[in-house]
Image (spheres, rainbow, N blue to C red):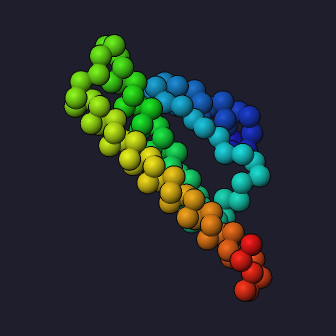
């Protein structure tokens, strides 16, 4: 079946739900032909999901151990690094779209 149809999204969401996952669709206007941005966006999305999973696991018993807090801090650092990489990719694309010599 056609991957752009509602049936394809319904199937993908059902599969994700069965695996206790969440599928986050990209906006239709995003340029998927820009590999540097897509890679950085995917990494930031993955790191965000890992931070949320770490928080959920840590909070599951209503207590936060020292080890859980260290793992959360590590996941937070990874998310921050991926967000900075995404910002860098966006700045590169921004600069590439300007005429030579332009700065603003």
* Residue visible at 66% across and 69% down in the picture: 93
| Nearer to us in this view, 33 or 4 | 33
- In the displayed structure, 34 sits above or below 74; it is below
* Residue visible at 75% across and 48% down in the picture: 28
Horizontal and vertical percent position of residue 2: 71, 44
Judge whether residue 15 can be spotted in this image: no
- In the displayed structure, 36 sits above or below 68; it is below
| Nearer to us in this view, 33 or 99 | 99
Horizontal and vertical percent position of residue 77: 38, 47
For this orientation, the residue located farthest to the top is 62
For this orientation, the residue located farthest to the bottom is 100
Q: Quadrant of the N terminus?
A: top right
Indicate left or right for 74 with 6 as reference. Answer: left
Q: In which quarter of the image is residue 59?
A: top left
Q: Quadrant of residue 70?
A: top left
* Residue visible at 71% across and 77% down in the picture: 103
Q: How many marks?
A: 0
| Nearer to us in this view, 100 or 47 | 100
Horizontal and vertical percent position of residue 99: 77, 82
Judge whether residue 61 can be spotted in this image: yes
Horizontal and vertical percent position of residue 7: 70, 33
Q: In which quarter of the image is residue 30?
A: bottom right
Q: In which quarter of the image is the C terminus?
A: bottom right
């Amino acid at each position: 079946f056609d991957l752009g149809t509602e049936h394809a999204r319904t199937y993908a969401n059902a599969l994700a739900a069965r695996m206790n996952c969440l599928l986050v669709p990209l906006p239709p206007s995003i340029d998927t032909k820009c590999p540097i941005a897509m890679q950085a966006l995917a990494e930031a999305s993955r790191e965000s999901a890992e931070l949320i999973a770490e928080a959920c696991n840590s909070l599951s018993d209503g207590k936060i151990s020292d080890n859980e807090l260290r793992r959360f801090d590590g996941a937070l650092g990874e998310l921050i690094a991926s967000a900075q990489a995404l910002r860098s990719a966006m700045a590169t694309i921004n600069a590439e779209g300007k005429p030579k010599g332009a700065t603003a």
